[in-house]
Image (spheres, coloured by chain):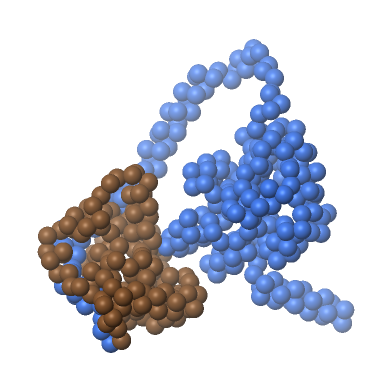
Chain colours: A brown, B blue
């Protein structure tokens, strides 16, 4: 288990990143705290990392999995929730641009790839490592995500 | 290059969420430290209660209850990539079969193992052409669970001997499963043998989900476990490279031996 100081540093360093991953996957603001707690509890139990990059990649992967698990539980409970983002805290929804809205309408795997490639600046090989998929799969997802975005944005390319 | 998620720059985690998370993790850590004392006390209390209720000193007075021949006494899981479960009675007869994935469903649809003796069922299964292909390229994991420890041991010995004498499964591992793993595997709708290895992997890297690893073949699971702890992988279940390297070392040692 990690010390309080280590936990405080990690939360301070990675909270914004985790918040962003939650935002692109979760529809409910109330689920975000659950994801944060699960992710950092696992982090506290994780013995060590090779370096900062390994630590960051590990946290991205765990957060994506936690978001997925929370959503699965959410469906299992058969709770009917709004598909709109109004359930998010005030201020979050107001920042939406057409582009961000379009990304949020992509399939979860495509959203992950777009986030990791464009926002975090990871290379295809690195994304493949984080998501534990083949490089070809990531290439395909990225291409399809861009194609879908192009259609949604009325013909505008990302590149 | 346009960053379609540029707007996320404005999004930050609230201080409240950060503080709540920190307090949650710290409280869990504190709770974990005190838990063993509580657990110990609880286990003692329950044990005393059970002994008082059961009164083992009077066990000889109890009427002998015949075991129903149709009762499931043990579950045996076989995982390569096809993942299946055989439920057997105390006489080692197959009462029911269960497929955990599509590959197993296809195989079990082509052979009828019900009411067969265990060795007969294994012979039928291993003679199946599709199953043989999986065995030839993969690793077979057999997990045995029974409430009765003696039955569990006898099944492990019987299956172990069968696998040893049968050349179809070149790489295999056969082990008894404890009740905790058996119950947890049931909860996650995963075969108990595979679940045991999944939990080993997750003890090294909690980033993996059970759902994700359940879709891996045994060969892939052992290759992954090998990356974390080579010694946790049973003999004969190492990855091809490690396997070949071992063979080579073995060969070299023998070669040296001949010249010494």
Q: Tell me the quarter of the picture where residue A62 sits.
A: bottom left
Residue B116's place in the image compared with A26, above or below, is above
* Left or right of A16 on screen, residue B147: right
Front residue of this view, candidates B218 and B43: B218
Farthest residue to the right: give it: B258
Q: In the displayed structure, does residue A119 sit left or right of residue B71?
A: left
- Measuring 42% from the left and 81% from the top, which residue is drawn there? A124
Quarter occupied by residue B22: bottom left
Is B175 placed left or right of B6 in the picture? Answer: right
Q: Nearer the viewer, residue A75 or A29?
A: A75
* Residue B53 location (% of width, % of height): 50, 18
Q: Position of residue B179 (x, y in %)?
A: 56, 40
Q: Could you tell me which residue is drawn at 47 percent across and 25 percent down?
A: B48
Image-based side of B7 in relation to B92, left or right: left
Residue at image point 27% right, 63% down? A22
x, y percentage for residue B46?
45, 28
Q: Nearer the viewer, residue A113 or A54?
A: A113
Residue B131: x, y in percent? 72, 57
């Amino acid at each position: 288990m990690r010390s309080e100081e280590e936990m405080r540093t990690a939360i301070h360093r990675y909270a914004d990143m985790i918040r962003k991953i939650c935002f692109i996957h979760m529809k409910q603001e109330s689920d975000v705290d659950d994801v944060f707690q699960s992710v950092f509890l696992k982090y506290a139990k994780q013995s060590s990392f090779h370096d900062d990059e390994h630590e960051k990649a590990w946290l991205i992967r765990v957060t994506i999995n936690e978001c997925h698990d929370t959503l699965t539980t959410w469906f299992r409970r058969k709770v009917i929730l709004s598909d709109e983002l109004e359930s998010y805290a005030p201020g979050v929804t107001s920042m939406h641009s057409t582009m961000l809205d379009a990304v949020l309408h992509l399939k979860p795997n495509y959203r992950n790839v777009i986030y990791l490639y464009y926002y975090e600046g990871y290379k295809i090989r690195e994304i493949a490592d984080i998501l534990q998929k083949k490089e070809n799969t990531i290439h395909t997802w990225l291409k399809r995500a861009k194609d879908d975005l192009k259609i949604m944005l009325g013909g505008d390319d990302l590149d | 290059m346009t960053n379609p998620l540029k707007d996320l720059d404005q999004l930050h985690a609230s201080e409240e969420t950060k503080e709540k998370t920190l307090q949650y993790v710290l409280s869990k850590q504190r709770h974990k430290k005190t838990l063993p004392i509580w657990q110990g006390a609880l286990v003692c209390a329950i044990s005393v209660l059970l002994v008082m209720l059961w009164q083992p000193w009077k066990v000889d007075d109890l009427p002998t209850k015949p075991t129903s021949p149709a009762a499931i006494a043990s579950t045996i899981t076989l995982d390569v990539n096809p993942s299946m479960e055989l439920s057997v009675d105390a006489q080692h007869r197959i009462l029911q079969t269960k497929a955990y994935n599509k590959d197993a469903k296809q195989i079990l649809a082509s052979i009828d193992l019900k009411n067969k003796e265990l060795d007969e069922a294994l012979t039928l299964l291993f003679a199946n052409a599709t199953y043989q292909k999986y065995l030839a390229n993969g690793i077979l994991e057999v997990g045995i669970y029974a409430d009765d420890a003696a039955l569990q041991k006898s099944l492990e010995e019987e299956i172990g001997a069968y696998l040893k004498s049968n050349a179809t499964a070149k790489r295999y591992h056969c082990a008894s499963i404890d009740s905790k793993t058996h119950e947890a595997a049931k909860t996650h709708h995963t075969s108990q043998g595979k679940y045991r290895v999944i939990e080993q992997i997750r003890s090294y890297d909690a980033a993996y989900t059970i759902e994700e690893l359940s879709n891996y073949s045994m060969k892939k699971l052992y290759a992954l476990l090998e990356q974390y702890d080579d010694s946790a992988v049973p003999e004969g279940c190492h990855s091809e490279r490690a396997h070949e390297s071992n063979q080579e070392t073995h060969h070299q040692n023998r070669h040296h031996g001949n010249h010494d």
